[in-house]
Image (tube, rainbow, N blue to C red):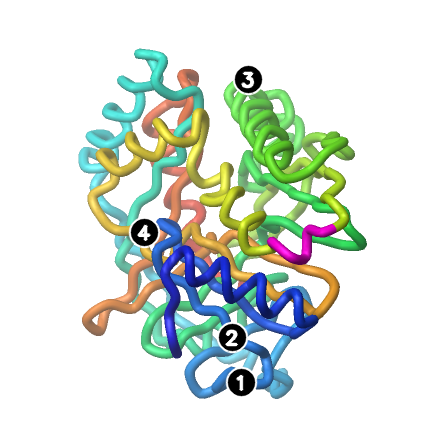
Amino acid sequence: MRTYAKEEAKTRIDSLANAGKQFVFIINYKQDCSYIEETNNINSAELRYNLNGYTDCHNVPTSKEKKTAFCWQPHPIPFSTYNHSFQLVRKNILAGNSFLTNLTCSTPISTNLTLEEIFYRSEAPYKLWIKDHFVCFSPEIFVRIQQGKIFSYPMKGTIDANFPNAEKQLMSDPKEIAEHATITDLIRNDLSIVAEQVQVLRYRYIDTVQTNQGPILQTSTEISGQLPPDYGSHLGEILFKLLPAGSITGAPKPKTMEIIGKAEDYERGFYTGIVGYFDGKNLDSAVMIRFIEQKDGELFFKSGGGITSQSNAKNEYQEMIQKVYVPIY
């Protein structure tokens, strides 16, 4: 598959959208590498997707295959390693350089499933598989564009649903409240760059996500805005103005990205980039979280969470580990 640099990617998206073509786009975290291809030209031996029902993959595993037992064993980095990065982030937050920083890690995992098998068996609204590279099964919407309106759904706040009074704990936790308020303001500001009449439609609603380790609760907010009538002629520019996603960087975005670059000891690559499709009229996309990368014959699960001045290192470390799951159940 051909890849595109940033300016090339913008031009290609604009061209395909103007022509009313159906296409899939995949953009990495740094926005310097993108896959953009018309759906009828995609080689399913190399790339498969199921993006909120928009899919090139109509053969699904049988119920017997879905029930086959599987092995799943994360090998988390030591807390001391995580804490070193956490303290660097915290120092910058206390110095006023950031209000919210998304710190992520790469966790080696052992499993008897291939990336392709994980793609088929995972239950998630947005799934993507690239042969010998990675699989993603994301629950988080990036933006949707429908009839000239743009919608975003930032997701911040996670708790084990089996905890006593889990929903109350999540909704009343001061750290979670502050983190979600910050990301909501950030996304409102981002959408205001490309749209007018930006407003919050739903604030801090809860979704339940099923995992192989049991259910978790996550909070999201719905924000919308009105795009200009000619948005289709510069769709690529609109997307790249919103990148990288605020939910996986922080606020203020430019300085926080510098902090992330110093705190994280690995390259995110396509992790925390976006994947989406344009059906000729409307667009849907997801943030590529819940992500497993294959490298030198080994598998690595990339996960993390938002750090604020109220964050506790051990709690954040446990949340990072909690997110190392597959939605197979």
Within 10 Å of disc 3 (Cα), the crowding (few <14, some 14-19, many 20+) is few
Q: Residue at (59%, 23%) from the top-left corner? A: 181
Q: Vertical placement of 105 versus 201: above or below?
A: below
* Whether residue 328 can be seen here: no
Cα gap from disc 3 to disc 4, whole angstroms: 29 Å
Could you tell me if the residues under marks 2 and 1 are in contact, i.e. CB atoms within 8 Å?
yes
Q: Which residue is nearer to you in this view: 27 or 56?
A: 27
**Which quarter shows the N terminus?**
bottom left
Within 10 Å of disc 4 (Cα), the crowding (few <14, some 14-19, many 20+) is some
Nearer mark to the viewer, of 2 and 4:
2
**Residue 187 % position (x, y):** 59, 33
Q: Residue at (38%, 21%) from the top-left corner? A: 98
Locate residue 313: give its quadrant: top left
In the visual, does 60 lie left or right of 97? right
Cα gap from disc 2 to disc 3, whole angstroms: 44 Å
Residue at image mark 4: 268
Q: Vertical placement of 60 versus 239: above or below?
A: below
Report helix, strand or loop for mark 3.
helix
Q: Report the disc number at residue 174.
A: 3
**Residue 53 % position (x, y):** 69, 70
Residue at image mark 1: 41
